[in-house]
Image: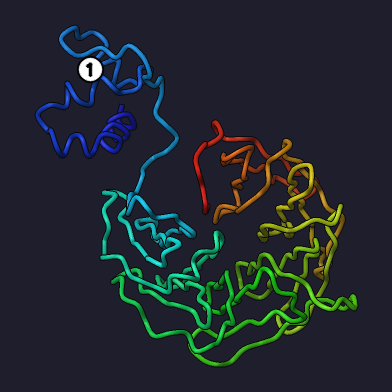
Amino acid sequence: MAYDAYRFASFFSRTIAEHPRLISLSALPFAPTNSQFYKVYRANRTDLPRILGGFQSWWTPCLATFRGSTNDTISSVGWSHDGKRVFSINTQGKFRLWDVETGTEIIRPLALIRHYFNYPRASCSIHDDIIYIPGPDYIFRIDLSTGEQLDSWPHRTEGCEDVVVSTDGRVVTIHPYKKIQRLRICEKDSAAYLDLPMTSTGQVGLVVTCVVFSDDNTEVAAGTEEGLICLWKYNRITDYVQTSPPAAVKCLAFIDGMGVIAGVDEVDGGTLQLYPLSADRKFENANTFRFPPSHSPAIFSPNTLKVATYGPGISIGIWSLDLTNSNSIHATQVGPLLVGHFHAI
């Protein structure tokens, strides 16, 4: 009942705010018919309007909708570390910060550089409640606690589209359409940096698609468009492995005590490939889980217990991961596909 009451108040919050004395007429008849809330407060009442069609049997998987301008196309979204705020950036270069509980904007929209956010995949990262936003020549930094834009980051970025920040404040910028020979890790508040060689395979360069730091920040891994996964123990590469078959690596995560898990986008559908790491930090043979056709892995949850996929058409799938041991990997879809015109996850 408490869950139903929470979902009812969240779903009909605008209706309740505008017509608090008409909840029985304007909200209660539209509650899901299988919810305990509906059964107790609506089912046996004959004095309320009756919905003949189009009603829901259960609460929608969508917990909340935050609305900005009707012309906004969102290019990047993310959470604050405390889980109480959500930020969004649209293709017009506007940064918005939302309160999760109320769905209201905390600050007035900040105008960034418009043309750069026409890309559909520009993504951000957060460290110590400061969000790092990729820009054409430098990194925008915004304090999520105040909504104020800070001074620009001291490193030139030359048009990066993704930025990854470790928990100790080191920053990696990603250029998803540019071949590079070294991965640059920059210090948070100084001009110091460390260049990591990509591989010793003799390739001219690789297109990096994703980067992830280990929990203790002693290691960093990168996935590439060419299907290579590189592993560094800072300042030196310790190993690299080719996905099988060679295909673009879309997301990566360290699994504590096991190894590295990769979401790989293959022609006939995506896969999850778990690579155990030996005692000397070398990749071992992968264990693979294959998604149904047309499902492509997009991003892991922060705790790596779930993964989101781009599904058939314009849908998103959420999958729960079973990683009980390094000898097998399995994923189970959680709930129905989420259908909508999604531009960012």
Q: Is residue 47 left or right of residue 107?
A: left
Q: Nearer the viewer, residue 271 or 113?
A: 113
Q: Is residue 119 left or right of residue 241?
A: left
Q: Is residue 27 left or right of residue 298?
A: left
Count of marks, rendered view: 1
Residue 289, image quadrant: top right
Count residues near mark 1 (Cα–Cα under 10 Å), then give few for <14, some for 14-19, many for 20+: few
Image point 47% across, 69% down: which residue? 126
Percent position (x, y) of residue 199? Answer: 83, 76
Q: Nearer the viewer, residue 143 or 237?
A: 143
Q: Which residue is mark 1?
A: 41
Image point 53% across, 72% down: which residue? 167
Percent position (x, y) of residue 339? Answer: 52, 36
* Local SS, label 1: helix
Residue type, label 1 = Tyr
Q: Residue furthest right?
A: 202
Percent position (x, y) of residue 60? Answer: 42, 31
Percent position (x, y) of residue 96? Answer: 35, 62
Looking at the image, residue 149 lies above or below residue 54: below
For the N terminus, the quadrant is top left
Residue 38, image quadrant: top left
Looking at the image, residue 217 lies above or below residue 270: below
Q: Nearer the viewer, residue 271 or 236?
A: 271
Image point 61% across, 40% down: which residue? 319
Image point 46% across, 58% down: which residue? 77
